[in-house]
Image (tube, rainbow, N blue to C red):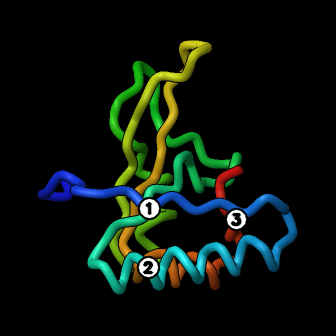
Amino acid sequence: MIGFRPRAIVSLSALSNQPADHHILAELIAWIAQEFDGWIDFGGSILPVSIEPLGPGGEIATDAANAYLDKIGGRVFSLPYLTASGEHWVSHVCDPEFARNWMEHDDFHMVK
């Protein structure tokens, strides 16, 4: 999918939940990913709750979810997984360009 295996992981988090904190964290991760030619793993879904990313049976992301993400720009991958309660969901991984565009989007949020 991405074409390589990560050699290292840098993990960042903010211990507060204000919009400014989300933006500072996003700016920092985008800068680090750009500087080290890396990818950003959000550790969960960045889709708004109004979009169901997987269809019946847990197939790959629906057209609605892909169309939503494609409008943002940059590269983003939806990684499907099964939750502990047995529901299908996705986690998102992106490049720095997508992260910067995502920060300007009306639905911007960081995964908590």
For numbered disc 1, what is the local secondary structure? loop
First in sequence, mark 2 or 1: give its number: 1
> On the picture, is 18 further left or further right than 32?
right
Count residues near mark 2 (Cα–Cα under 10 Å), then give few for <14, some for 14-19, many for 20+: some
Q: Where residue 36 sits in the image (x, y, percent)? A: 30, 79
Give whichever of discs 1 and 3 has the lower sequence position. Answer: 1
Work out how far the residue at label 1 is from the one at label 3, CA to CA, in angstroms.
20 Å
Q: Pointers 2 and 1 in contact (CB under 8 A)?
A: yes
Q: Amino acid at mark 1?
A: Val
Residue type (three-letter) at the residue carrying disc 2: Ile
Q: Nearer the viewer, residue 62 or 44?
A: 44
Q: Residue 109, labelled with which disc? A: 3
Quarter of image, res 106? bottom right
* Residue located beneath label 2 in the image: 32
Assess whether mark 2 and mark 3 are in contact (beta carbons under 8 angstroms). no
Residue 109 drawn at (x, y percent): 70, 65
